[in-house]
Image (tube, helix red, strand yellow):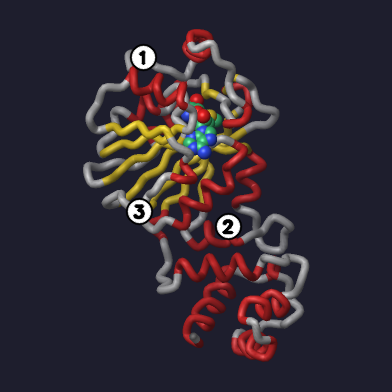
Amino acid sequence: MIGPVANKEYVLKHLNVYDVKALKKYGQNFLVDDKLAKEIVDSISDGENKTLIEIGPGLGALTYHLLNKQGKKILVEIDKVMAEHLSRQINDENIDIVCQDFLKYNLENIQGEIVVLANLPYYVTTEIVEKLIKCPKVTQMTLMVQKEAYQRLVAPINTKEYSPLSIFIEYLGGAKVLKKVSRHSYIPEPHVDSLVFQINVNKRKQSNNEQDFYKITKAMFLMRRKTILNNLTSYVKDKDKAISLLKVLNCNENMRPEQLDLDFYLRLTDLIKRDN
Ligand code: SAM
C-alpha cells in the first residue's frame, strides 16, 4: 500500500474505480480519519508469536497501519471486490487475505495467541463478538462499533439489555472505551456515532468450565421474563433438582435472570458440572 487509505479522496476514488456503492448489506461504512486509524492500530498488542486478525478490512483504512505491526496477519473480508483490491495492494508473505464470512472462518487451526482488530459491520456485531469471546485463543480485541451496540454489550445487571454476552465480557475482565468516534468520520455516514473499545482477556478468571459457563448462562436467559427456577428447570429437566440447586446457591426461586450476577452464574455452572 503506498499511502494512507482513511481519507475521503481515497475512498470516493476507489468506490468510483470499481464502480461500486458502499454495500448496506455488508455494513460498509468506510473510515475517513487516518489519525484515528493510526491511534486505533497503535493501541493493539503485537509480537512474533501472535496472529493479528483484521475482520472486514474493506479498502484498508486500518490495514495500512497494521502492516507495521509484528506478527502474522490475516485479513478476513466477505466482499470479493474489497478482498481482490487488497490483494493487489499488498504484497507481503506475512499477510493472508481470506475472502470469507468471518462467522464461518475457522479459528481452531491458528497457533498461539490471536489479537483481533475490526471496524465491525453493524448488522453482525453481536454474532462476531460472541464468536470472539468464546474462542480461548483470543487474548485481545479492539473493536469499533456503533455506540448503542456497545451499550448493549456492557449492559449492567438489572437492566433490560443485561445478557449472557455482557456477563461473559465482565468475566473476561470487562471492556474499556478507547475513543468516541463521530458519524462524520465515515463514508457513507451512519445515523449514529460509534466508539472504539478494547477487551484484554489476560484477566480471564480461573474457571474449569468456561464453555459450559457460557452455555448454561445462555440457557438461563432463554426465557428472560420467566423466573430463574423456570429456566433452570427447563435446562436440568427436573424441577426438584432445580429447586435444590437454587437452595445450595442461596438463591430466591423467583428471581429473574437479569437480577443475578456473574458470581451466581459461575457458581451455578460449577454446581451443575459437579453434579453430572
Ligand atoms: N475496515 C474498513 C474501514 O474501517 O474503513 C471497513 C469497515 S466496514 C464498517 C465493515 C467491513 O466488514 C466491510 O468491508 C464489509 O464488507 C466487511 N464485512 C461485512 N460482513 C462481514 C463478515 N461477515 N465477515 C467479514 N467481513 C465482513
Horizontal placement of 49 versus 23: left or right?
A: left
Q: Between 106 and 34, which is closer to the camera in this rendering?
A: 106
Residue at image point 46% right, 21% down: 81
Q: Nearer the viewer, mark 1 or mark 3?
A: 3
Disc 1 to disc 3, C-alpha distance: 34 Å
Kind of residue sitting beneath label 1: Gly
Disc 1 element: loop
Kind of residue sitting beneath label 2: Leu
**Residue 19 percent coordinates (x, y):** 54, 11
Mark 1 or mark 2, which has the lower sequence index? 1
Q: Disc 1 designates what residue?
A: 3
Q: Disc 2 designates what residue?
A: 165
**Residue 79 percent coordinates (x, y):** 49, 28
**Residue 184 percent coordinates (x, y):** 62, 21
Disc 1 to disc 2, C-alpha distance: 38 Å
Q: Disc 3 designates what residue?
A: 108
For residue 127, say whether it is visible: yes
Q: Is residue 69 above or below residue 32?
A: below
Question: Quadrant location of the N terminus?
Answer: top left
Residue at image point 41% right, 36% down: 76
| Marks 1 and 3 close (CB-CB < 8 Å) | no
Neighbor class of circle 3 (other Cα within 10 Å; few <14, some 14-19, many 20+) is: few
Q: Is residue 163 above or below residue 143?
A: below
Kind of residue sitting beneath label 3: Glu
Disc 3 element: loop
Please identify the quarter of the rendering in which residue 225 is found: bottom right
| Marks 1 and 2 close (CB-CB < 8 Å) | no
Neighbor class of circle 2 (other Cα within 10 Å; few <14, some 14-19, many 20+) is: many
Numbered label attached to residue 168: none
| Marks 2 and 3 close (CB-CB < 8 Å) | no
